[in-house]
Amino acid sequence: MPAPAQHRIIFKHIDEPGYTNDIDCYLRNGGYEVLKKAVARPPAELIDEVKKSGLRGRGGAGFPCGVKWGLVDRKSGKPIYLIVNADESEPGTFKDRYIMHQDPHQLIEGTIISCFANNVKQAYIYIRGEMPEGARILERAIAEARAKNFVGPNILGTGYSCEIYVHRGAGAYICGEETGLIESLEGKRANPRIKPPYFPAVLGLYQCPTIVNNVETLCHVRYIVEHGGEAYGKIGTPGNTGTRIFCVSGHVQRPGYYEFPAGTITMGQLLNDVCGGPLPGRTFKAVIPGGSSAKVLRFGERYKGKRKVGPDMVDYDWGVEDVPMDFDSLAMIGSMGGSGGVIVMDDTVNMVEALANINAFYSHESCGQCTPCREGSLWMKKISSRMVHGDARPQDGALLKSVADQIPGRTICAFGEACSWPTQSFIIKFKDEFDAYSEVKKTLPAERTVLV
Amino acid sequence: MNLKPETFQRIDEVITHYPVKRSATLPLLHLIQEDAGYISDEAIAWIAQKLELQLINVLEVVTFYPMFRRHPIGRRHVKVCRTLSCALKGGYKTCETFTSEFNTHLGTNHVSPDGEVTVEFVECLASCGTAPVVMIDEVLHENVDAAKAKQLSDQIKAEAKARK
């Protein structure tokens, strides 16, 4: 079956010839019309639209946005903050970059609508430090929007006021974790907070109720408020509504970003039809479907079980190519949709070396406050890079897995899971390569691509 | 502190963005590093005083975040992405091309002998679809294979020459 056509609602203007990131261009394309209508409606109605839409957060966890907004403590009398999580840093993910650089007003409009719906007077966009140009573009866009009275005091004469400031990170991946981000925004080390009690919806920024939403999620909110939650819910599949942006990188002919109705495209259609298949003369070996912490899938393996289709339970028997690219299907086969970052590896890649690359990343990025994660990620890096650069032993795979197995569930934040899943899944699925690496290593071509 | 007048202005402005002064720690560190090139002991003490914090509150932030450095680096800062998607497309070779072109070692502790360039391997720059990617100062360069790395190196050398 050929792949469905792309359906670009968030990336509608990305790479469009002649489309620029200034406010005049945005206004020519109907910009801020949704905000004008939104501020004339009761805020609760807007929250209802988002709840009805079934929108799930696009940062990685897929948590329902309407539920997140529903958890906000509105009785404490404290101010409510909204933080835009623009700390895009999960390896393999590169969607928010294009929204912020090419269509920043879409994000600002979505942010102000979300602020109005939740009675937020102050929002911050936390953008990663490595995007200085993105930060400048956003600052200019906010100034333009302020000049037109879409941001700032008494927005469009409604009496409602809201400020947005851009806050730059400084190279730490853990700032993408929402409570780490909040600590960072408070001017501290980004050590994530323990939940309970520090649920951002109740005790977030400055111990006030706080909403943290991903860049793409807020753009979806703009679309939902424009078209209604019900209409949005008809895009995609039940439980996986709207569109999903897939960021494909690694060994395919046409890497890039592609937006499809959620759940309507399979891995095989995405990689073969949309991305042009493997590079000439090569075959696909493995794919990480949702950012580098998602568990790896091995081409050739089968996934079997029962799943709900409408009211019925039906059997499924899928290869990697058959898996629908939605949150629930990917979770069912033991991985996750995460942030939509799809990293493809072909038969030239040695999986021990690929894992050593990933382990070096997580070891570098652990914030260090929980011992299992700080020490575990470091030892996983040390062992896997010793295998590549020093002596490899047949029992190293088991050793690596024993370290990985002691991390998840024993840390304050989900980084513990994120850093152990690659090791666990690589070793379960490519046990043969880990067991044989000490021998195979001698025969690997010396001119192969260095991964670590 | 010896900073440009506009840096002082931007510092005073950015502090007003937050209800709690401490939140301005990262913005102040960025502004000072952009102006002075690195974060000195004096800068840490100055920020602590400005934001009514203890020295350790600022120092612990400087040592936590990879982008802040405690000493000067080369005039040009080349950051090559090291993470998986870039590595799969030859990022290590790209990095090696820069270090050998400028006869230097990796990391912010090193500057090329001509004082011109510091080459650093950094983690994911979030542009995996155009791997390998490199940031030179504040500009992102995409699809930087070894040949393009050589070309960018030549450009940096030519610009250095023109300045002398």
Image: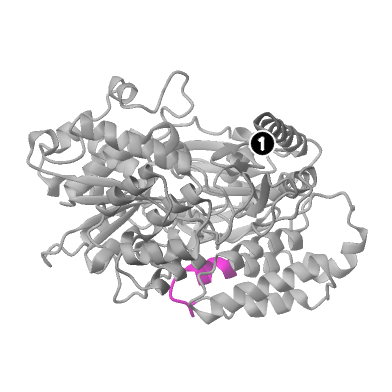
Residue occupying the far right of the picture: A443
The residue lying toward the viewer, choosing from B164 and A225, is B164
Looking at the picture, how far across and down is residue B149, in whole percent?
73, 38
Instruction: Answer above or below: position of A369 versus A306.
Output: below
* Residue A377 in view in this figure: yes
Q: Residue A430 or A80: which is nearer the viewer?
A: A80
Residue A443 in percent (x, y) is at: 92, 59
Q: From the viewer's perspective, is residue B102 above or below residue A294?
A: above
Q: Is residue A426 left or right of residue A124?
A: right
Q: Is residue A344 visible?
A: no
Q: Chain of mark 1?
A: B
Against A404, is A253 above or below? above
- Residue at image point 28% right, 48% down: B13
Residue B151 lies in magenta, yes or no?
A: no
Residue under label 1: B143
Tell me where residue B66 sits by quadrant: bottom right
Q: Please tell me which residue is depicted at 62% across the width and 40% down the height of the picture.
A: A271
Percent position of residue A370, x then y: 49, 79
| Residue A411 on the magenta span | yes
Tell whether A70 sits left or right of A17: left
The residue segment tinted magenta is A409-421
> In what element is the residue under mark 1?
loop
**Amino acid type, label 1:** Asn
Q: Quadrant of the C terminus of chain A?
A: bottom right
Please rate how many residues cluster around mark 1, counting C-alpha atoms within 10 Å: few if below 14, some from 14 to 19, many from 20. Answer: many
**In the picture, residue A398 is in which quadrant?**
bottom right
> Considering only vertical position in the picture, is A147 above or below B114?
above
In the picture as drawn, the residue positioned furthest to the front comes out as B2
What residue appears at the point 23 percent right and 42 percent down from the top-left corner? A112
- Counting the numbered discs, the total is 1
